[in-house]
Image (cartoon, rainbow, N blue to C red):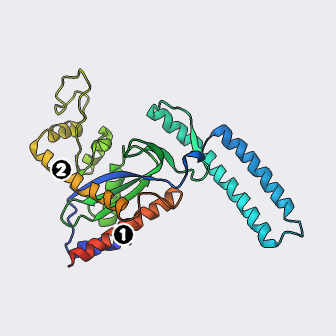
Amino acid sequence: MITQVLALLMKQDLVDLSRVAQDGTRVRASAGAASFRREQTLEALMQQAREHLEAVTREAADPALNALQAAARKRGAEQRIERLEAALKQIPEVTETKKRSGAKDATVRVSTTDSDARVMKMGDGGFRPAFNVQFATTADAARVIVGVEVTNRGSDAGQSTPMIEQIEQRTGERPAEMLVDGGYAQHEAIDEATDKQVTLYAPVPKPRQGDTRDPHAPREDDSEAVAAWRQRMGTDEAKEIYKQRAATAETVNADAKENRGLDRLAVRGLDKVLGSASLFALTYNILRLITLRG
């Protein structure tokens, strides 16, 4: 339906896809912080859950318990086991993520209520279970959402490439320019965007203390695309273009959280969270269509 609304907007020449801004926002998950358990604890809980299911199955034969009550108890016990199995399956992935990130706290914990949720650093500096919701929005006057994705990674690294692909799949066009913040500006992502003939606008990282090199000057190990990005972002023209990112992507995130209830999730699991984010995007675009058509 999002794609259909975009098609209607494009058919009436109401949207310009040449410049798109992408931004991620971390949305509080339905899972509680206390639901995150270590692997050893999860295994102990699984043993208890299996024993409970066996007990419930035996009790089902009790004539004092009606069939509906017995079925409800058994279903609850089975669902508990399913959630614990899902949590245990996430252990290897979370372990690998911890290793790659070099996290100070190497303890691996997974939620028993939403195994897809991850503890992330939020906008206020605190750490809570969350999902990373990604929106891509046109930087023209229409300002419509042309891409939506959800990940359970706290970082935005690597998210520009699949978003470019999604935009092309939805609209049949690639944006000529993508405006993203510094979290997206990995060299690999810049190379991939350039390969797709998309110009990436993202701030160049500030030099570390003691590094006197010009951050906008090409480095010896830079690819051609990365060297061009450094030089581009040192120009006044690029700085003016990049200003549009905050006025575009961040306003969409603010609307989602402040006006549309996407500040805290009522569903669990990546698929359902993507459904919630997609419903917001659809509603947002329909309202923009009504406004643009007068």
**233 or 161, which is in the foreground?**
233
Residue 138's tag is none
Q: Is residue 19 left or right of residue 149?
A: left
Label 1 neighbour load within 10 Å: few <14, some 14-19, many 20+: many
**Under tag 2, what secondary structure?**
helix
Q: Which residue is mark 2?
A: 243
- Between the C-alphas of marks 2 and 1, the distance is 26 Å
What is the total number of numbered labels drawn onto the structure image? 2
Q: Position of residue 203 (x, y in %)?
A: 22, 41
Is residue 47 rendered to the left or right of residue 152? right
- Residue 157 location, quadrant: top left
Picture residue at 86% right of the left edge, 60% below the top:
58
Reading the chain from its start, which is encountered first: label 2 or label 1? 2
The residue at which mark 1 appears reads as 282
x and y percent of residue 21 in the render?
Answer: 26, 54
Which residue is at 17% across, 33% downward?
Answer: 216
Q: Amino acid at mark 1?
A: Leu
Quarter containing the N terminus: bottom left
- Give the SS element for disc 1: helix
Q: Amino acid at mark 2?
A: Lys
Residue lying at 32% horizontally and 68% vertically, measured from the top left: 284
